Every structure is written in structure tokens, then in C-alpha cells.
């Protein structure tokens, strides 16, 4: 088996079905692949739909979880069933364009210096979606929080050429099963968001390289499993704090907390001025996360 494609499904029945359909339409060569879908205890039609696909395709495997394991635990569990030498982690809201999977696989296989690779993600209107960037040093975090860093290409961007980078989005991430297992997989303390940053940071510390493959293009609809904007913001706060506590000094953690606190305070202040309940409630919860962080 050349490639195991791993998908985590959570209440995205129709999108997951489209993702799997686009995979089959994309791969036209003799590439031996399997699709492993772990369903995180969905409450929609995901499981019945996936069971029907399993009946139709002998290379589609369904793992039913009785609990919502999140991104890290879900993927780690799924790869225990993987038979491929290579792994491709795909979100359940990805639409593969043309032969992008084969292009990404070929790029990986023909470049010995590539240990992790991600494709070029596009929005639904095919405009570029920022999906790679530098690791989140304190200046980068500051740019993300206060300077609209994504807009200026300071924190995340979408290159038009293949290049070495610090990280690529976990929505589309390729590596080998051997290397993924060597690194211990995704950190299961991270439920959603920052998982790929942590993994690729650990990989770089061990001398492994990550590349962005601009020629392999995928539509990423984005946040399909998230309910509203509050939850992702809170998970980002948790992810930043956990990442810094794990990898950086106490001084750096303290400075990070100060920036996150300032962002929350400013957002709450703006919320009060504009009578925006969403800002007040969301960043009130974010402040609690900072307070609870050890």
C-alpha cells in the first residue's frame, strides 16, 4: 500500500462524502491507496453514509469512535489501521482539485529533503487561503493578535512556488508512517488547533524539513466542524498557551500571557463600546483560560 488517506469526521456527512468522492476522482494512476475515516461520534448522518461507502469501496475503512476524540487522538487512532508507507491527513471539508494528491505524493517521493509536505489550499471561490508560515515566535504572535498579520503576509500566507517552510496546515499534510510514529504522532493534549504546529516544531528540532507544494491544490472550506467563532478562538488561546508551556521558557510564557490578556481586554472594551455580546462573552472566556493556565 502506497498511501493511507486519513480523514476525521464529525457532523460533516455531506462534506465528508464530497471529500471522498473528490479523492476517487483525483487518483487515476496505479497509486495503491486506502481511505481511513474515523468518525468522532457524529450525531448527523455521517456513520450511515460512511457505511454505504464502505460497502461500495473495498479501500474505504470506517472506524467508529464512541466519543469525540478531537483531532490529535482521532488521527493517532486512525493511523494504527493504516497500511500505507505514506500518510495523507485530510480534513473532512477538503475538495481535491484535479490530480493534486498524485502531485503531492510525487513531490514528496522525488525530493529526499522533504519529510513533511502540504498542498496549496484555496477558498471555495478558488482564491488563495493562507496555510503556511513561520513558527509562532513572540513577534509572530504579536503580529497575529494586533497587526492583522495574515492580511500582510507576516504570520500566514500562500506562496505560488514550492518552498521550504516552518509549518503547513494540518488540513492537508503528508509524511511517512514511519516518521509520524517516530515523532510520537500528534500531541493528544491538544484537542483542536496547533496540533500540526507542535508536530512540525518537534520534527524541525530533530532535523526534519517541511515543504509547501504550490502545484498541488485543494479547496478547503474551513471550520466545518466548529460551532461558531467562539470555540475556535478559545481553542487557539489554549493551543498557544500549551505550546509555549511545552516548548519555551517561563519568561516567554509570561510575555505570551501578557499579549493574550491585552488582546482579550481590548476586545472586551470594544465589545462594550459597540454593545457586541459576542466579543464580551468570547474574550471573557478567553481571560478565564489565561487565568487557569499554570
Image: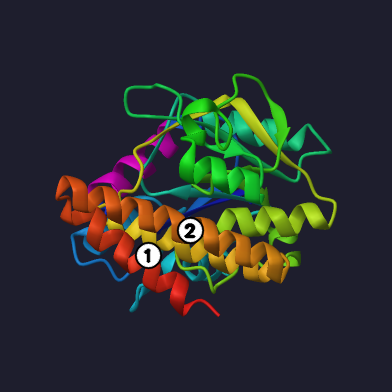
Query: Mark 1 or 2 closer to N-term?
Result: 2
Q: Nearer the viewer, residue 93 or 53?
A: 93
Whole-percent x, y for residue 205 in the image: 81, 56
Q: Which residues are magenta?
A: 14-25
Q: Quadrant of the C terminus?
A: bottom right
On the picture, is 159 further left or further right than 90?
A: right
Residue with the mark numbered 1: 286
On the picture, is 179 further left or further right than 254?
A: right
Question: Dot 2, crowdedness within 10 Å: few (<14), some or many (≥20)?
Answer: many
Whole-percent x, y for residue 166 in the image: 70, 43
* Magenta-colored stretch includes residue 118: no
Residue at x 70%, y 66% (from the top left corner): 251
Q: Give the CA separation, mark 1 to mark 2.
A: 8 Å
Q: Visible in this render: residue 281?
A: yes
Q: Are marks 1 and 2 in contact (CB under 8 Å)?
A: yes
Q: Nearer the viewer, residue 64 or 90?
A: 90
Q: Quadrant of residue 159?
A: top right
Residue at x 44%, y 27% (from the top left corner): 97
Residue at x 32%, y 57% (from the top left corner): 55
Answer above or below: position of 20 versus 83: above
Whole-percent x, y for residue 154 in the image: 58, 32
* Magenta-colored stretch includes residue 15: yes
Residue with the mark numbered 2: 260
Element at label 2: helix
Amino acid at each position: 500500500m502506497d498511501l493511507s488517506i486519513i480523514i476525521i469526521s464529525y457532523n460533516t456527512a455531506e462534506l465528508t462524502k464530497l471529500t471522498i468522492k473528490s479523492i476517487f476522482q483525483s487518483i487515476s494512476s496505479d497509486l495503491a491507496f486506502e481511505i481511513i475515516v474515523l468518525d468522532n461520534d457524529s450525531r448527523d448522518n455521517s456513520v450511515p453514509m460512511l457505511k454505504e461507502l464502505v460497502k461500495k469501496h473495498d479501500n474505504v475503512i470506517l472506524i467508529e469512535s464512541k466519543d469525540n476524540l478531537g483531532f490529535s487522538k482521532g488521527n493517532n487512532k486512525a493511523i494504527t489501521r493504516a497500511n500505507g508507507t505514506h500518510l495523507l491527513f485530510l480534513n473532512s471539508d477538503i475538495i481535491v482539485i484535479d490530480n493534486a494528491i498524485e502531485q503531492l505524493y510525487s513531490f514528496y517521493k522525488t525530493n529526499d529533503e522533504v519529510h513533511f509536505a502540504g498542498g496549496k489550499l484555496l477558498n471555495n471561490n478558488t482564491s488563495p487561503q493562507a496555510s503556511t508560515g513561520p513558527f509562532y515566535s513572540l513577534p509572530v504572535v504579536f503580529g497575529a493578535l494586533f497587526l492583522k498579520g495574515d492580511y500582510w503576509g507576516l504570520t500566514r500566507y500562500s506562496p505560488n512556488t514550492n518552498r521550504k517552510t516552518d509549518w503547513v496546515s494540518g488540513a492537508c499534510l503528508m509524511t511517512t508512517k514511519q516518521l509520524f510514529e517516530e515523532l510520537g504522532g500528534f500531541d493528544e493534549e491538544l484537542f483542536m488547533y496547533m496540533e500540526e504546529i507542535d508536530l512540525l516544531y518537534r520534527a524541525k528540532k530533530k532535523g526534519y524539513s517541511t515543504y509547501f507544494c504550490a502545484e498541488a491544490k485543494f479547496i478547503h472550506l474551513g471550520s466545518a466542524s466548529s460551532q461558531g467563532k467562539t470555540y475556535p478562538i478559545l481553542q487557539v488561546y489554549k493551543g498557544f498557551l500549551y505550546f509555549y508551556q511545552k516548548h519555551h521558557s517561563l519568561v516567554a510564557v509570561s510575555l505570551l500571557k501578557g499579549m493574550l490578556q491585552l488582546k482579550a481586554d481590548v476586545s472586551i472594551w470594544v465589545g462594550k463600546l459597540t454593545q457586541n455580546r459576542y466579543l464580551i462573552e468570547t474574550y471573557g472566556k478567553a481571560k478565564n483560560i489565561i487565568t487557569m493556565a499554570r
